[in-house]
Image (cartoon, grey):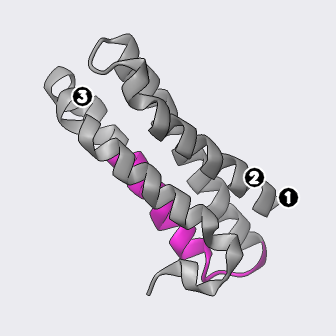
Amino acid sequence: MNPTTNGPRFLAYDRAMEAVRLVRPLLERIRRGHRGLADQVVRAATSVVLNIGEGSKRRGADRAQFYRIAAGSAAEVRCALDAAEALGFVERAEIAAAWDRFDQVVAMLVTITR
């Protein structure tokens, strides 16, 4: 069951899935340059959607904690993409859409947890 069926607050889940899809075409080039960095991008990106999904079924402070973890993972992906660009594995223009989408996810999750 998709957590987005539970209402508008799960727009963050939809945006996170979009962000994961935007990262996918970049992974092979990042992997060629640095396998560990590509693996970290995958782990962090999947952590975002998994924590949003799990948090959606929790209550109170427990729910907020899952959303905070998801926000931290989204920020981690963003930083990993920055590192991949700085190392020359991808171009800034190629990561811009994913970077922006993960920023949107962080903003939504911060709003939800306030």
Residue picked out by circle 2? 110
Is 5 on the left-hand or right-hand side of 43?
A: right
Which residues are drawn in magenta? 42-60
CB of mark 2 within 8 Å of CB of mark 1?
Answer: yes
Which class describes the residues within 10 Å of circle 2: few (<14), some (14-19), or many (20+)? Answer: some
Q: What secondary structure is found at the residue carrying circle 2?
A: helix
**Which label was assigned to residue 45?**
none
Q: What secondary structure is found at the residue carrying circle 3?
A: helix
Residue picked out by circle 1? 114
Q: What secondary structure is found at the residue carrying circle 1?
A: loop
Q: Give the alpha-carbon distance from disc 2 to disc 1, as whole Å.
A: 6 Å
Check disc 1 and give the amino acid type: Arg
Residue picked out by circle 3? 30
Which class describes the residues within 10 Å of circle 1: few (<14), some (14-19), or many (20+)? Answer: few
Is 2 on the left-hand or right-hand side of 64?
A: left
Q: Give the alpha-carbon distance from disc 2 to disc 3, as whole Å.
A: 29 Å
Check disc 2 and give the amino acid type: Val
Q: Is residue 50 visible?
A: yes
Residue in view at x 45 percent, y 56 percent = 18
